[in-house]
Amino acid sequence: MGDILAKYNLFAAFWMTIKLSALGAVGALLLGTLLAVMRVSPVTTLRAIGTSYVNVVRNTPLTLLMVFSILGATFTLGLSFSDQATTNAFIWACIIIAVYHAAFVCEALRSGFNTVPQGQAEAARSIGLTFAQSLSQVILPQAFRGAVAPLGSTLIALIKNSTVAAAIGVADAAGLMKTISENETGTLGVFGLFAIGFVILTLPLGLWFTSLSRRLAVKR
Amino acid sequence: MGDPLVLMKDVNKHFGDLHVLQDINLGVDKGEVVIVIGPSGSGKSTLCRTINRLETFESGTITIDGRPLPEEGKALAELRADVGMVFQSFNLFAHKTILENVTLGPVKVRKMSKADADKHAIALLERVGVAHQADKYPAQLSGGQQQRVAIARSLAMNPKVMLFDEPTSALDPEMINEVLDVMVELAKEGMTMVVVTHEMGFARKAANRVVFMADGQIREQSTPEDFFTHPTSDRAKDFLGKILTH
Ligand SMILES: Nc1ncnc2c1ncn2[C@@H]1O[C@H](COP(=O)(O)OP(=O)(O)OP(=O)(O)O)[C@@H](O)[C@H]1O
Ligand SMILES: [Mg+2]
């Protein structure tokens, strides 16, 4: 196994997984928050858009979206971010990961909204805060604190799901694993190594989110 | 005397089939303290909440200081800033400190500087006797203290009128007076108040008028003295009989 490890750059592959996950997570958090706000807004059309988005995206396989970004969007529709195929694939992978997990972030946040009593919004409106101010000052901060645990689960799922990017040629951990298993023999140990790599990424995160959710919980 | 500060004209509201507010006509003058009293489910909370449009209504008009209630948006938010509201369950912002609860409105709505808002807030918290708790979170305070903070939070906006919906009903008996004392002070200082409460001691001490509601209608209005000693309607007699027996 030693010669295999000398031949391939494991760290570069995991570094790619980390970059992909981090950018995807930031995008998913922003888009998911926007969707959650739409779903609680008083405007019927916005609510409907938010609901449809979540239902459509949640029920579409991630692999299908990922492959579509290259075969459909780049090749057929000509939507390319870079002349370099690898850069284009990386950017598309980040976008698809963000778009897909935004639906789950939205649902996690919605469970957070449900932890905020109606009276908080009424008190916010009563002192003259506008809808946007009530959201940003009172409702969202409490909703996020109530959603830390499900947001943590979503992030861990996102990291593991980022392996789907290998399907469009992104050189992440899963991509490297595929390359090694295709080209080398006696790769069982390598599989174990990759599994451990993912555990190292996700296990501390899970523990951190658990303690965070306890520390940030709103006392009522 | 000019027009009433709060004026409800022929206000009607339904919850589904239930006609909760039936042709409500009520004027509250500047500096007046009006008590709303009546059996459970008679529409007292709903009446209180329509005044700052936490509840919508179908017909009639409500004006505050001569201005009709805006339907929604920024204009409604501006109007609400002038109408204080104190809830039965306090509703302090659970993730903010006591001080932040009181300064949020002045800073975000009145655009006051943080330093000025802090100073003003501390003075108000001193007035209601909880200044030493300024850095704590609501859950760390007793109910009576939370409610006094809620009053300070409303006062921080310099409201023209304050609405109280059963402000002492969720409190342990020994904490009721500390909240009522603050309210009596406010009344003495000339605050215009609409108070839903069954606290007759407070009504006698501070109120100019008692409004009796039953089944979504205002059945009777008079001074506290007259209302508690000579109620005219049978509904009021019946109701008083029930709350006076214990
Ligand atoms: N959001 C709502 N949806 C449907 N019905 C409601 C709603 N809020 C109140 N009601 C009903 O309207 C009626 C009046 O309610 P309201 O809360 O105004 O009464 P109240 O006089 O304040 O009673 P209480 O003394 O119990 O607080 C009640 O029958 C109540 O069940
Ligand atoms: Mg009520």
Image (cartoon, coloured by chain):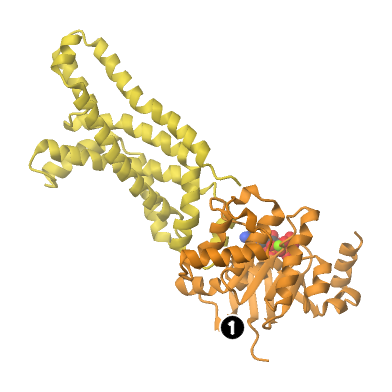
Chain colours: A yellow, B orange
Pick out the residue farthest to the left: A83
Q: Name which residue type carries label 1.
A: Asp
Q: Give coordinates of residue B35: x percent, y percent.
A: 75, 73
Callout 1: helix, strand or loop? Answer: loop
Q: Is residue A9 above or below residue B101?
A: above
**What quarter of the picture does the N terminus of chain B occupy?**
bottom right
Q: Is residue B39 above or below residue B204?
A: above
Q: Nearer the viewer, residue B46 or B160?
A: B160
**What quarter of the picture does the C terminus of chain B occupy?**
bottom right
Residue at figure coordinates x 60%, y 79% from the top left: B62
User: Which residue is the site of mark 1?
Assistant: B65
Residue B41 seen in the current view: no
Residue at figure coordinates x 48%, y 64% from the top left: B115
Residue at figure coordinates x 35%, y 39% from the top left: A59
Q: Give coordinates of residue B155: x percent, y percent.
A: 61, 69
Q: Give coordinates of residue A4: x percent, y percent.
A: 17, 13
Q: Nearer the viewer, residue B224 or A81?
A: B224
Q: Quadrant of ligand 1?
A: bottom right
Q: Chain of mark 1?
A: B
Query: On the rendered structure, is B22 left or right of B76?
Result: right
Query: On the rendered structure, is A195 left or right of B156?
Result: left
Number of callouts in the render? 1
Q: Give coordinates of residue B49: x percent, y percent.
A: 63, 68
Q: Nearer the viewer, residue B96 or A78?
A: B96
Query: On the rendered structure, is B115 left or right of B9?
Result: left
Query: On the rendered structure, is B52 left or right of A36?
Result: right
